[in-house]
Amino acid sequence: MRTQVGIVGAGPAGLLLARLLQRAGIDTVVLESRSREEIEATIRAGVLEQGTVDMLNECGVGARMMREGALHRGIELRFGGRAHRIDLAALTGGRAIMVYAQHEVIKDLVAARLESGGRILFGVEGVSLQDVDTRAPSIHFRRNGGAERLECDFIAGCDGFHGVSRPTIPSRLRREFVRSYPFGWLGILVEAPPSSDELVYAWHERGFALVSTRSPQIQRLYVQCDPQDVLEQWPDERIWTELRARLATTDGWKLREGRIFQKGVVAMRSFVVEPMQHGRLFLAGDAAHIVPPTGAKGLNLAAADVRVLARALAAFYRSGDEAPLAAYSAVALRRVWRAEHFSWWMTSMLHRFHDDDAFSLRLQRAQLEYVAGSRAASTSLAENYVGLPWD
Ligand code: RFL
Ligand code: PHB
């Protein structure tokens, strides 16, 4: 088999890249280790930046998102029993965010690709990348028991944090930057009406809590937990007790409860690899960087990476110009590090770090009061949260 760009991974990064390249007339094959059913059922992100929304619309896959997603013009910071609204739109010249689940984005991208005759090979095994530092790289894999090879001009490593692409770059040529956090998030899906019109990021001495949504009938909630916790430690009643305590306000706000039908624990990590390229292998999305979910940046960064990469590949195929490809890593990393900082900052401001550190709690409260009370500080949060301009 042969293609122009071989794409490893059918997550947001891989599928969006395939879509952008298809529109530029560039042939691609997407290889995915899981099944279509599995990728369409994996519960992850919910918040899309304005720029990601625009990008999905521009490439013709935004119709259902515009119908079924929820546009939010503000978020709430909650601490000291009080709500403090950050008016995203007013602070950023009208920009907003869309709450629309990542697996719905995946469904829309898979449907559009298959409808337009694009290739996605699901359930591939034993993927390995060969000759990436030559002009004729290839991807070796097994499918239906047989060994196959995909010859490419370029390979896009969009296979997430645990994929094979990043380790293909020799360790002496890459540098990894890591920070892990002493906590995780327990995330649940609940059958209930929304408790709030906007997302609530709550700081509390018992730990962080987040109120998000999926639809008028289904809500997404998170509580800070120990990253080692197993689900048996979190019976429904304990989750509701923590959510009620951490989200309580003095004005009688009520948490709408219901049947919990999905639970999961997520560890928190910040991670960046430099460079994001080796020869003709280009990394995009979680394969190259991870952020803790507090800033809602992971999927959005994946979209930003593939936008830069698609443009660089289009320039190459149009005119043979290799300069944008050579600049890919440096250009992408500028946005990556901004999002790394924002995500670390939000995480540090909102989570309980140590049991006995009263000084840190006071600092967090001072910071929250400043962010909520100062137009300059809330503008800084708002412009990062809705996403800084692309170029
Ligand atoms: P993905 O989504 O991990 O997709 C990688 C795909 O590659 C496949 N794969 C392979 N395929 C072939 N061969 C191999 N050897 C392979 N190895 C792996 C995998 O099966 C998979 O299908 O990476 P991608 O595309 O870079 O997308 C990144 C995003 O998924 C991630 O950053 C976000 O989910 C992060 N995130 C959030 N991001 C946001 O922008 N806004 C949010 O509100 C938000 N909330 C979240 C989040 C992540 C969370 N979790 C679970 C970590 C909330 C949570 C709880
Ligand atoms: C979500 O709805 O899953 C979500 C929302 C905001 C975040 C992270 C996740 O910061």
Image (cartoon, rainbow, N blue to C red):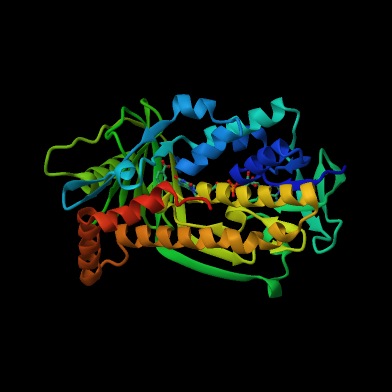
* Displayed quadrant of residue 220: top left
Q: Residue furthest bottom?
A: 172
Residue beneath the point at 54% across and 69% down: 177
Residue at the spot 35% in from the left edge and 44% down from the top edge: 93
Locate residue 167: give its quadrant: bottom right
Q: Can you see residue 45? A: no
Left or right: residue 303 compared with residue 270: right
The image position of residue 293, as x and y in percent, is 44, 52
Residue nearest the viewer, comparing 52 with 286: 52
Choose between 154 and 41: the one closer to the eye. 154
Report x, y in % for residue 109: 62, 33
Residue occupying the point 58% across, 58% down = 332
Q: Is residue 356 left or right of residue 262?
A: left
Between 259 and 285, which is closer to the camera in this rendering?
A: 285
Residue found at x 56% / y 59%:
289
**Which percent across, then down, holds residue 46?**
45, 40
Is 156 located above or below residue 71 in the figure?
A: below
User: Which quadrant is home to the N terminus?
Assistant: top right
**In the rendered image of this protein, does residue 288 appear above or below residue 254?**
below
Q: Residue 70 appears at what percent x and percent y?
A: 40, 31
